[in-house]
Image (tube, coloured by chain):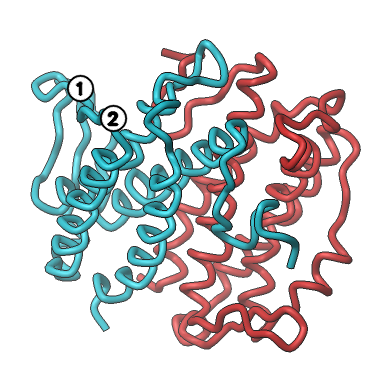
Amino acid sequence: MSLSQSLLPEFDHEMANTRRVLERVPAEKFSWLPHDKSSSFGKLATHVANLPSLASLALHQDEVNVAERRANLPKADTTQELLDLFDKSAAEARASIAGSSDETLFQTFTLRNGDQVIFSVPKIGALRGFFMNHIIHHRGQLTVYLRLNGIPVPGLYGPSADES
Amino acid sequence: MSLSQSLLPEFDHEMASTRRVLERVPAEKFSWLPHEKSMSFQRLAVHVAELPSWATMTLNTGELDFATTPYAPSKAESTQDLLTIFDKASSEARAALAGASDEDLFKPWTLRNGEHVIFSLPKIAVLRTSVMNHLIHHRGQLTVYLRLNDIPVPGLYGPSADEGNM
């Protein structure tokens, strides 16, 4: 089994769960935030919806400048637009992973901010640390945002308090 | 490079980040919860602190049956207790991971409740999803708990709002 084939079942499982969370983010709460230093509901959800594109970037490019990427991220104004962003970025990421050879996955990927190198790691490591762990982190935050708004939380690694 | 060797740099990185979050959970807020259906600060932090022990269990056993081994959370009365639970769990998990052969990592591991099989997956998949992703999910929730209590949030995948913008 190739390395990319070994990654796809986990990818599909986690992306299906991510979509279940995004489906519940209500557009009328996009401007809500739990604390004045927090990302708004809409900003956090849009970040999660766009995050799979990091997997595609890491596989198709050898380096990314974070400042340029940030300026070009698509926005969402409705739950459907959020899901459209996510479906597109997740489908592209899946195709990028499925099409990557073991050799590609061990090539180096570098993230920089202007001239500063933030990290430089094998692409397989970037898929974990830069994409998968990163999206799960912010999706975890989104589940608290759902709860604080009285929206039932889908169980992700076991039943949530709304399901048990 | 063995599969386990390829997992250790990520393990070390994420466990170091996790410790930075747990260090900031204040004992005087242990009973605080953001919503009546939420886990308390203490329960969520204990869950995160214990989760690395699931890696050790996955690597050292073939299955867990909730019917015969009900979950009993560890007790923590202080932030130091949390860190002691976490340091023990994460150092044992690291040793178990470092000692696992590729063959071990492809053996199946089963979670069941009596006759009902919840899942049965290769150990490598259990380590990824039920241990690492699961821990990161709840650690993400903990960072919101910190923020809601005006405790500075450590940046994990980039700077937090308490650390300034990149």
Foreground: A23 or B52?
B52
Q: Residue at x 55, y 54 (%)?
A: B154
Of residues A38 and A70, the one drawn nearer to the viewer in this rendering: A38
Q: Amino acid at mark 1?
A: Asn
Give the chain ID for the red colour. Answer: A
The reply to whether discs 1 and 2 touch (Cβ–Cβ < 8 Å) is yes
Label drawn at residue B118: 2
> Label 2 lies in what chain?
B
The residue at which mark 1 appears reads as: B113
Q: CA distance from mark 1 to mark 2?
A: 7 Å
Using the rendered view, name the quadrant where residue B50 is placed.
top left
Residue type at the position of mark 2:
Ile
Residue A19 at what x, y percent from top left? 64, 38
Q: Residue A62: give x, y in percent of width and height.
A: 65, 86
> Which badge, 1 or 2, is on the more N-terminal residue?
1
Work out whether residue A20 can be spotted: no
Q: Label for residue A7?
A: none
The chain whose colour is cyan is B
Relative height, residue B149 to residue B39 (above, below): below
In the displayed image of the protein, which residue is found farthest to the front? B28
Identify which residue, A105 or B58, lies in the foreground: B58
Residue found at x 74% / y 73%: A66
Task: Find residue B36 and report its horizontal and vertical position in percent.
Answer: 52, 11
